[in-house]
Structures are given as structure tokens and as C-alpha cells.
Amino acid sequence: MPSKKTKKKVRTIKIDVDKCNGCRACEVICSAFHAAPKYSSNNPARARIRVIREPLTDIYVPVYAGEHTAAECAGRDKYTIDGKEYDECAFCRASCPSRDEFKEPDSGLPLKCDMCEGEEEPLCVKWCLTDALVLEEREEEVEEGQEQEELDIGLEALAQKHGLQKILDAVAKMSKKD
Ligand code: SF4
Ligand code: SF4
């Protein structure tokens, strides 16, 4: 029997590295939005976007927090841009055991960009005055049930890493905040 298709909305933030001036407003607003209670504090270590910087040439590259991975890669990558070498894995989006980026500083739980769920426009886009971050939206056809499958895989990976109870406690804590 042919599987049913449904439409899902895909939101993409286009990053224009040449327009980023390194102001870090995106980090500040992201961490404030995700503070508990909302906007009570800001700490870029809690942001789901980090601006990677090469000080000698003032190149700024915004990187969004992506998927959590339970195991680190067997290899590493290292970029050279305009003759400047960046740290290993500098542009990787994963919350991974090999480094501290994209982890909640207190609990160690992985951070992932949620596109500012509930907001009409992602706040980092709104606060980026240079238009280095621009939101684009489109619709895509997907198999029915695919989104649930992706959610199941993500939850299973988290439960394997942190234990189910810790995840349940974190969810209970988050629902109290809302
Ligand atoms: S707010 Fe925009 S210009 Fe400022 S650091 Fe973030 S991406 Fe760059
Ligand atoms: S879209 Fe929202 S959650 Fe994602 S990095 Fe920007 S401010 Fe943070």
C-alpha cells in the first residue's frame, strides 16, 4: 500500500558570514530566551548559536547547535579560511562528548536550536541588525509518521547517554518553566 504523504514546513536560517560583525547579539538573546525564567539572565554558554572567531583576521562564523551525538567521530576536521587555521571541529554543529560546546553548563544536557519555538521569528534573526542571519520558509512533502520516527530516535539517543530518569526530570523541569 502506498504510504501517505503529508506536508511539513521547513524553516532555514541563511547565514551570510561576510555580513557578521561579531557583535554576539544572537548569542545573548538566545541564551536569555532559554533562561529560566525567560529573560532572567544571559550566558552565551547556554546559547544555541555560537560565533566562532579568528581574532587576527576578525572573521566571524555563526554556528547553530544541531543534533546530539552519543559517540564522537573517529576523525576530526580542521578548516583554513583566508590562510587562517581554525580549531579542530570548530564549525561542527553537534553536541558531542569530545568538547564543551552546545551543552547546558549546569546539567551537561545537550543544547539544540529549536528555532525559538512559539515565536513568530527566531530571535537571533530578529536581533541580527546586519542581516547576517535571514529566515527562509518552504513546504516539503514527507512520509506520514516520519517526524515521529525522528523524535523517537532523538529521545532514544538521549536516554542512552543520560539515563531515562534524568531526561524525565529535565522534561518535568522544563514544563514547570512554561
Ligand atoms: S547578531 Fe548577527 S552580526 Fe551579530 S554576531 Fe550574531 S550573526 Fe553576527
Ligand atoms: S533560532 Fe532561537 S533557539 Fe535557535 S539559535 Fe536562534 S535564538 Fe537560539
Image: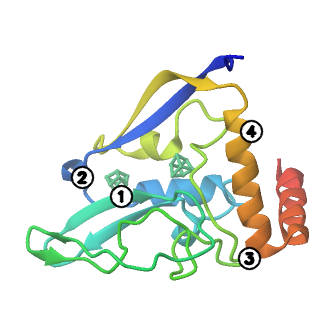
Compared across the picture, whether 52 is left or right of 166 comes to left
Q: 74 and 173: which one is in front?
A: 74
What residue is pinned by disc 1?
Answer: 62
Q: Earlier in the sequence, mark 4 or mark 1?
A: 1
Distance from the alpha carbon under mark 1 to that under mark 3: 24 Å
Label 3 SS: loop
CA gap between label 4 and label 3 equals 26 Å
CB-based contact (under 8 Å), mark 2 and mark 1: yes
Q: Is mark 2 within 8 Å of ligand 1?
A: no
The answer for how far apart the CA atoms under marks 3 and 2 are is 31 Å
Distance, label 4 to label 2, CA atoms, is 34 Å
116 relative to 27 in the view: left or right? right
**Residue holding disc 2:** 17
Relative to residue 147, is residue 104 depicted above or below?
below
Q: Quadrant of residue 170?
A: bottom right
Do the CB atoms of the residues marked 4 and 2 lie less than 8 Å apart?
A: no
**Looking at the image, what colour scheme do you see?**
rainbow
The kind of residue on which mark 1 rests is Pro
The residue beneath circle 3 is: 107
Q: Quadrant of residue 176?
A: bottom right
Residue at point 83%, 65% (across, down): 167
**Which residue corresponds to the image point at 28% horizontal and 44% vertical from the top-left?**
130
Identify whether 125 is placed above or below 46: above
What's the residue type where badge 3 is placed? Answer: Ser
Question: In percent of the image, x 24 and y 52: which residue is there?
Answer: 17
Disc number placed over residue 148 in the picture, else none: 4
Query: Disc 4 or 2, which lies upstream in sequence?
Result: 2
